[in-house]
Amino acid sequence: MTTILAGASNDRKVAFVSGCNGISGHAIVEHLSKQSASKWSRIVVTSRRPPPTPWTDSRIQFVAVDFLDSQEKAVEALRLVCRDVTHAYFASYIHDDDLAKLPEKNVPLFKNFIDIMDQVCPRLQRICLQTGGKHYGVHLGPTAQPVSEDIPRYADDNGLNFYYQQEDHLLAAQQQRRHHENQWSYNIIRPFGIIGFHPTGPSLSLSLSQSPQSPGSQN
């Protein structure tokens, strides 16, 4: 990875990926880095800590940012490197074994992300929010089966489904930009389960490989 402050030409896209140390964020960066420089001229990646294995693609620039820190601090760190960002991917997530506590950090995490992107990305065209199977309330109780993207929200979430709050903030922020000179659109993706690779081996994905125990053939 190298530090690149040069601007991109207006016809090339610049990506911003949060949560690059997670399975989803890492996969997004891997995918973007396989595209040509004529398509993605720069890829800005963030997490609280540097990746354990830095990417060697010269287009990739890492910036340490904690979106739960003050917005002023994040804006200062990102203002120059994000001035040409056209597409922002939100893949940050803070886990807690107590599911009731998930909104406490994940809602302000995304709200700060949106507010900061609005301040530091004057060329922003699109924001991608990744949610997941918890959108359907599978962590709260029985759900209708099969689930589909057009089913209503889980009725009795008691404010515990942070994905609803993230989506609501995204929609509200985009509506505020409708009559602004610099408008952006959005995508919401909802993978139900994610199986992927990351060199740090996140605790959510740890498993034990063991050979099957069998008496085998008597012969």
Image (cartoon, rainbow, N blue to C red):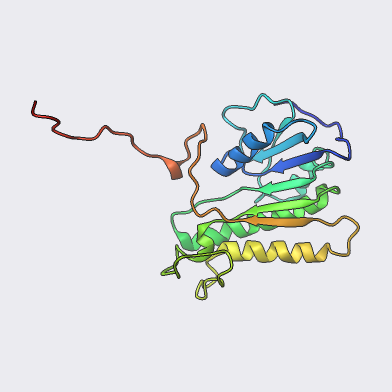
Tell whether 170 sits left or right of 148.
right
Q: Position of residue 150 (x, y in %)?
A: 59, 68
Q: Nearer the viewer, residue 214 or 142?
A: 214
Q: Quadrant of residue 153?
A: bottom right
Observer-nearest of 87 and 48: 87
Horizontal arrangement in the rendering, residue 130 relative to residue 214 (left or right): right
Name of the residue lying farthest toward the bottom: 155
Foreground residue among 39 and 76: 39
69 lies above or below 167: above
Q: Is residue 20 above or below residue 189?
A: above
Where residue 48 sits in the image (x, y, percent)?
62, 40
Residue in view at x 71 percent, y 61 percent:
170
Residue at the (80%, 29%) spot, across then down: 4
State the quadrant of the C terminus: top left
Label total for image = 0
Residue 80 location (% of width, % of height): 83, 39
Q: Residue furthest left?
A: 218
Residue visible at 73% across and 52% down in the picture = 127
Please tell me which residue is depicted at 87% across the width and 55% down the height of the picture.
182
Instruction: Farthest residue to the front: give it.
Output: 219
